């Protein structure tokens, strides 16, 4: 039996609330990083010669530092009226994973 199951059986689900909140805040940091990377990709595509947005603080806060995400903005470019973003499917998958709640409901 897992600890969360034991706590639920004891009727003390409120003890799990701090962990749920911490997990949600961490997921929020990772989601914000992904969206900031998309903003940086658009900014780079609009003006490739402009100073690149430094997302190192956001990566540190989110505890995410993978090369493909770090390099995504500099590889982005405009194609016709669209934005070409390398590894976009990977980013979309990561956004979906981070926004999916897989814990117990707090209600």
Image: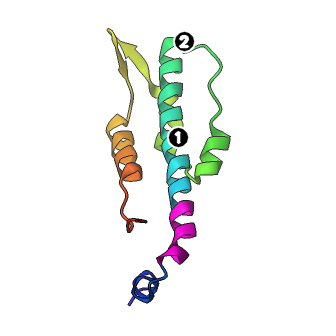
Q: Which residue is drawn at 48% across and 39% down?
A: 34
Q: Which of marks 1 and 2 is in front?
A: 1
| Label 2, residues with CA under 10 Å away: few <14, some 14-19, many ≥20 | few
Vertical arrangement, residue 76 with respect to residue 91, above or below: above
Which range of residues does the magenta coloring cover? 13-22
Vertical arrangement, residue 101 with respect to residue 72, above or below: below
| Foreground residue among 13 and 46 | 13
Residue 16: percent from the left, percent from the top? 51, 74
Residue on which disc 1 sits: 32
Residue 2: percent from the left, percent from the top? 41, 86
Q: Which residue is drawn at 65% across and 32% down?
A: 54
| Foreground residue among 74 and 39 | 39
Type of colouring: rainbow
Q: Which residue is drawn at 49% across and 53% down?
A: 27
Residue 19 magenta-highlighted: yes
Residue 98: percent from the left, percent from the top? 41, 51
Q: How far apart are marks 1 and 2 (CA)?
A: 22 Å
Dot placed on the residue nearer the N-terminal end, 1 or 2? 1
| Label 1, residues with CA under 10 Å away: few <14, some 14-19, many ≥20 | some
Question: Mostly what secondary structure, the magenta segment?
Answer: helix
Q: Residue furthest top?
A: 80
Question: Which secondary structure, mark 2?
Answer: loop
Count of picture labels: 2
Residue on which disc 2 sits: 47
Residue 68 magenta-highlighted: no
């Amino acid at each position: 039996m897992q600890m969360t199951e034991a706590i639920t059986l004891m009727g003390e689900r409120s003890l799990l609330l701090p962990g749920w909140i911490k997990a949600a805040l961490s997921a929020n940091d990772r989601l914000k990083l992904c969206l900031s990377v998309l903003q940086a990709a658009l900014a780079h595509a609009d003006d490739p010669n402009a100073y690149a947005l430094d997302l190192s603080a956001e990566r540190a806060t989110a505890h995410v530092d993978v090369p493909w995400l770090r390099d995504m903005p500099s590889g982005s470019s405009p194609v016709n009226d669209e934005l070409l973003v390398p590894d976009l499917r990977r980013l979309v998958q990561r956004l979906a994973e981070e926004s999916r709640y897989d814990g117990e409901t707090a209600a």
